[in-house]
Image: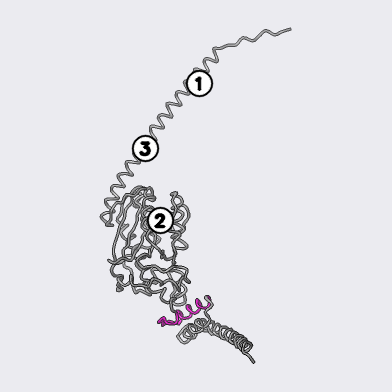
Amino acid sequence: MRKAPRRSNSKPSLRRNRYSSKRLEDLKAQLEFVRGRLAAKARESERIKAEAKIRGAAALGDVVPGREVRTVAGTHWEAEKVFSHHGGKGLWDLADLPHDLFDGIANSEIPPSHPETWAFLDTETTGLAGGSGTCAFLIGVGRITPKGFRVCQYFMRDFAEEASSLSALEEDLASATTLVTYNGKTFDLPLLETRFRMARKKPHFMKLPHLDLLHGARRLWRLRYESCKLTALEAEVLGIEREGDVPGFLIPPIYFDFVRNGIADQLAPVFHHNALDIVSLACLTSIVPWVFRDPLQTNLTHGGEMISLGRWLLRMKKDEEALEMFRRGVQKRIPSELEEKTLEEIGKIERRLARKAKKNGNALRLSCPV
C-alpha cells in the first residue's frame, strides 16, 4: 500500500533563513568594523613612522654630514669624506703603488691594475651571525683618488631603503677592477650577495678579482701578534690607537634604536668606525703585499715574521727561499718550541735539497758523452 507523501512545513525553514541572514549581516558589520580599526591603526602607524623618519633625517644630517640620494630603487643616505692622513701616515703615496702589487700575495690570480681602480669595502650589519635575516645597513667603499683617499658610505635609514643603497653600491663598483676586504671572503661578500639575491638583483661585482687581506696578514703576523683583527694590527703595525671608538657588538643595537626612535646621536661613532676600518685596510694593503712580492729582499726584523714567511714559501714549493727565511728566523730571539720546530724543518729541507742535487748530478753525468 502506498504511503501518502509527507507535507512540508515551510515556516521553520523561513525562520531559519531569516536568522541566518541576520547573523550573516551581523558578521559582515563586525568585519567592516574590524577592517576600519585595522586601517586606522595602519594609517596611524604610517604617520608615526613618517614623522620618525623626518625627525631621524634631520637628526642624522646634524650628526653625520651627508645628503639624501635618490636612485631607481628609492632613496637612501650618503656620506662622503676624503682622508689625506691616517695617524702619522700620509695617504697621497697610495696612488704610486705598483699595478702588480698583488701578484705575490695572490699567486698571480689578480691581474695588474691601477690603484685608483681598487675598491676597499667594509660593512656594518644588523648582526654578526650572517644569514638571510642580516642586513648591511652601512656599506663603505674607499677609493684612491688624486685628491686623497675617498670613503663613500651608503646608509639605509630604514629597511625599505636597502634596495636603493644596494643600487648605489653597484653603481660605485662598476668602475672597480679589484675588491680589497678584510675577512670579506667569509663575511661581507657572501652577506651582500644574499641581500642582492633577495632584492632580485645580480651582484655583478662578485665577479671582480678579490683580495681578502686577512689571510695575508695571518700568514705574516700570526706568530708575532696575539690577534690579527684589523683594530689590533692598526695599533701594532700602524701605531694608531682609536679614541672613542664604538665596539662592534654595540653597533646593531645602535642602528635598531635609530630605526625605532629616529635618534641619531649614537650613529656618528658608527660611521667613524666604518671609515677608519676602510682607511686602515688601505694602509695595511700598502704594507702586507710588499712582503710577499719579494720575500728575501723584505726588511723584516722579527723572527716570527721570518718563519711565517718561510712557511708560506714552503707551501709555494720554494724550498731554497724558505730555507733562507728559516735560517734568518732562528737567528732571532724566538720561543724555544718554535725554534725546535723550525730547526726540524730546516733539516728536512736540507735533506730534500741534497737528494734533489744528487739526482740532478747523476742525470748530468748520464747525459755527458764518454
The x, y position of residue 173, in whole percent, is 38, 59
Asked whether 220 falls inside the magenta stretch, the response is: no
> Going by the picture, which residue comes out furthest to the bottom?
370
Of label 2 and label 3, which has the lower sequence position? 3
Distance from the alpha carbon under mark 2 to that under mark 3: 30 Å
- The residue carrying mark 3 is 41
Q: Is residue 20 left or right of residue 252?
A: right
Foreground mark, 2 or 3, reads 2
Quarter containing the N terminus = top right
- Disc count in the image? 3
- The residue carrying mark 1 is 20
In this view of the protein, can residue 253 be seen by the observer?
no
> Going by the picture, which residue comes out furthest to the right?
1
- Estimate how packed mark 1 is, as few (under 14), some (14 to 19) or many (20 or more) residues with alpha carbons within 10 Å: few
- Estimate how packed mark 3 is, as few (under 14), some (14 to 19) or many (20 or more) residues with alpha carbons within 10 Å: few
Residue at point 46% right, 80% down?
304
Tell me which corner region of the image, top left, top right, bottom left or bottom right, holds residue 51: top left
Compared with residue 33, is residue 316 higher up or lower down, i.e. above or below? below
Residue at point 56% right, 83% down?
349
Q: Is residue 232 left or right of residue 52?
A: right
The x, y position of residue 104, in whole percent, is 45, 74
Q: Is residue 178 left or right of residue 19?
A: left
Helix or strand or loop: what does disc 2 sit on?
strand
Residue type marked 2: Ala
- The residue carrying mark 2 is 136
Asked whether 299 falls inside the magenta stretch, the response is: yes
Compared with residue 320, is residue 222 higher up or lower down, i.e. above or below? above
State the predominant SS element of the stretch in magenta.
Answer: helix
Q: Are marks 2 and 1 in contact (CB under 8 Å)?
A: no
Of label 2 and label 1, which has the lower sequence position? 1
Q: Give the magenta part as a residue range.
A: 295-315
Of label 1 and label 3, which has the lower sequence position? 1
